[in-house]
Amino acid sequence: MRDKPRRITRDEGVFNRPEAMPMHPCPIEPGWIHSGTPVTRSGDHSSARDNFAWTSVWDCTRGTFEWHFDMDETVYILEGQVRVTDANGDTHLLTAGSIGYFPAHSTWRWEVDRYVRKIAFLRREVPLGLRLATRVLSRLNLDARLRAPRDPDAPRMRRSTAALVLMSLAL
C-alpha cells in the first residue's frame, strides 16, 4: 500500500534526503507513451495542511511520452536530463541543477535519453471564487490586520466588517 504524504502541523517541518525516500511505482498512462518503456517511480515528501500543495521526488528511465499537467508543477532536476517540448514546439533541456515550471492544464512532451530524477513542487489550483477572495484579502492586508496585536493607534478592521467583505465576495 502506498504511503500518503505526511501532513504537517503548524509547528512541524519535514526533512529527508531524496535518495533515502521510499519510492513507489507510478506508471505513465500507456496512451501517453510514444517510444520506449519508461519506468517511473515517486516518493511523497510532504503535504501542506490545506492539501493544496505538496512535494515529492520522481524518477524516470528512458522513454518519450506526453505528460498532461492537471496542476501547477515546479521541478528541480537532481540527476540526469530531460528534453521537454511544449504545444508550440519550443524545446528546453533540463539537466541537473535546472528548474522548470509547468502550468496546470498544459501538455508537454518528455524525452528521457537515459534517466532523470527530480524534486516536484506541486500546487493544486485554488477554486475561482476562493482565488478572488484571497486576492482581495491580500490587497486589504486583512489577514495581518486581524492577527495583529491590539494597537490603539493603528487602523484596524473589525471582524464584522471582515465578515461582510467576505460575504460580498461570495455573491
Image (tube, grey):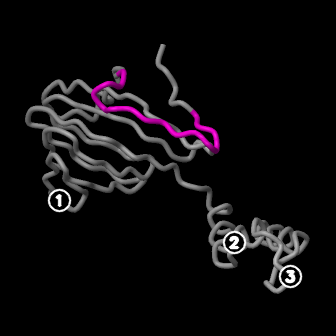
Q: Quadrant of the C terminus?
A: bottom right
Residue at the extreme right of the image, as rendered: 160
Mark toward the viewer: 2 or 1:
2
Q: Residues within 10 Å of mark 3 (few under 14, many from 20)?
A: few
Residues 125 and 52: in front is 52
Name the amino acid, label 2: Leu
Mark toward the viewer: 1 or 3:
3
Q: Residue at x 30, y 42 (%)?
A: 67
Q: Earlier in the sequence, mark 2 or mark 1?
A: 1
Residue 20 falls inside the magenta stretch: yes
Question: Is disc 1 in contact with disc 3, using a CB cutoff of under 8 Å?
Answer: no
Q: Which residues are magenta?
A: 7-22
User: Picture quarter containing residue 115?
Assistant: top left
Name the amino acid, label 1: Gly
Which element type, helix, strand or loop, lies under badge 1? Answer: loop
Which element type, helix, strand or loop, lies under badge 3? Answer: loop
Residues 157 and 131: in front is 157
Q: Earlier in the sequence, mark 2 or mark 3?
A: 2
Above or below 149: residue 26: above
Residue highlighted by disc 1: 89
Residue highlighted by disc 3: 152
Q: x%, y% of residue 51?
A: 58, 42
Residue highlighted by disc 2: 137
Q: x%, y% of residue 54?
A: 48, 42
Residues 156 and 110: in front is 156
Instruction: Report the Cα–Cα distance between label 2 and label 3.
Output: 22 Å
Q: Main secondary structure of the magenta part?
A: loop
